[in-house]
Image: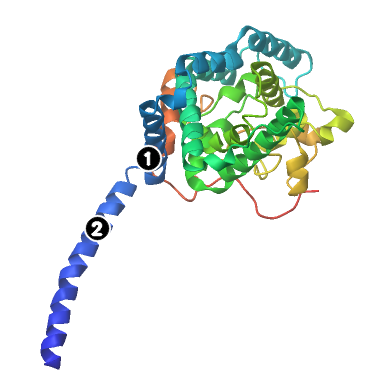
Amino acid sequence: MVEVALVTTSLLSSQRAPRKARGAGLAARVSSRVYVPAVLIGLLAVALATIGWASHFGGASYASSTSALRVVLVGPVTLAVLGVFLVAERIRPAQQRPLVARGHRQDVLFTIFNASLVAPLVTALSLSFSEVARRVAPWIVLPRIGVVPRWAAIALIFVAMDWCNWCAHLANHRVLALWRFHELHHSQEDMNVLTVFRTHPLIHVSYLVALIPGTVLLANGALSTTLLVIYGAIVAFAHSNTNLGFGPLGRLFVSPNYHRIHHRLKGRQDVNLGFALTIWDQLFRRAVYPNPDTIRADTGLPGRPLVVEQASPRPRHLAVFVAQLVAPFRPVNRLTDLPPNDDSRDGLR
């Protein structure tokens, strides 16, 4: 009987082995052609938007919400502010650049892309995420608290939103699947105010967490379009090619000189992660303050693992644009595709 059992076990094992081998072979073939986690993030975005569409976005007006987002992105006030920042780049540049550098032209493409096609996607994801959050955990929406002034609730939302953006930003530098979408933003070698638009559409999935503070305190106050424009202007200015710090206020607000360190070509890039406020970097010892060398530091990705418009004699803007959008789904090369984070604490203070 023992011999029969051993023979039976051997036969079963021999049958399982080819199945496991076939499964492993299929997984290897798929991973050699596409980065599966990136595909899953794309499917998550589609599923979330579909849920929102099926639920009519919780009664919110999709069209008016998209229009409001476009006002924040490229409304008259936003365009005027961006124009002022572009002039500031010419008057006081951190690095000398042609009036219209290759990187500037590429960022114009991303600006148009964001205003026309990405804005509807972000609106769908935002409304869907808020609706799902309210349905799954209705208790997170606090009722109107009479003792809390409306302005205080809005200020709290602003600060909490910035904190959530900081956390998502850190995750984008620590989680490879998220970094594959975020590396596009770091590929810019001609930093300018429009670099804020140089983002992959699916990166917004990771930043949906920043909607939670507004959902929690919705009954107590909401961020106005004006405040969102101001927040966006601060973030855009931080990306400008402007040699400008904020003096003592630089310990509180993100300046161009401070944020440039985050985009530097040499050195770790998982520092100076703040969007508008530097306090989160200080609390978690990720703040590196500017000096004459960092102000003029080159920016971009070491080794250019992502195709960029500066890599060839001709810029080929449209071809590069398509390649940059497809890049997160390419197979991973762990020798070149990991985020440029050095775990040593040198340079942090």
Identify the residue under disc 1: 39
- Residue at 44% x, 47% y is 333
The numbered disc on residue 23 is 2
Q: Where in the figure is residue 8, as x and y percent of width and height?
A: 12, 81
Position of 348 relative to 143 (above/below):
below
Q: Which amino acid does label 2 sit on?
A: Gly
Looking at the picture, how far across and down is residue 84, in whole percent? 72, 11
- The answer to whether residue 242 of the structure is visible from this angle is yes
**What is the distance, in whole Å, between disc 2 and disc 1 at their CAs?**
19 Å
Badge 1: how crowded within 10 Å, few (<14), some, or many (20+)? some
User: Earlier along the polypeptide chain: callout 2 or callout 1?
Assistant: 2
Residue at the image point whose x is 77% and y is 28% from the top = 149
Please report the residue visible at 63 percent of the width from the left and 39 percent of the height from the top.
164
Reply above or below: 326 against 233.
Answer: below
Query: Position of 130 compared to 93: left or right?
Result: left
Give the camera-side residue of 11 and 162.
162
Q: Position of residue 57 (x, y in %)?
A: 44, 26
Q: Quadrant of residue 54?
A: top left
Q: In the figure, residue 35 lies in which quadrant? A: top left
Any part of residue 336 in sight: no
Which quadrant is the N terminus positioned in?
Answer: bottom left
Q: Label 1 is placed on what type of residue?
A: Val
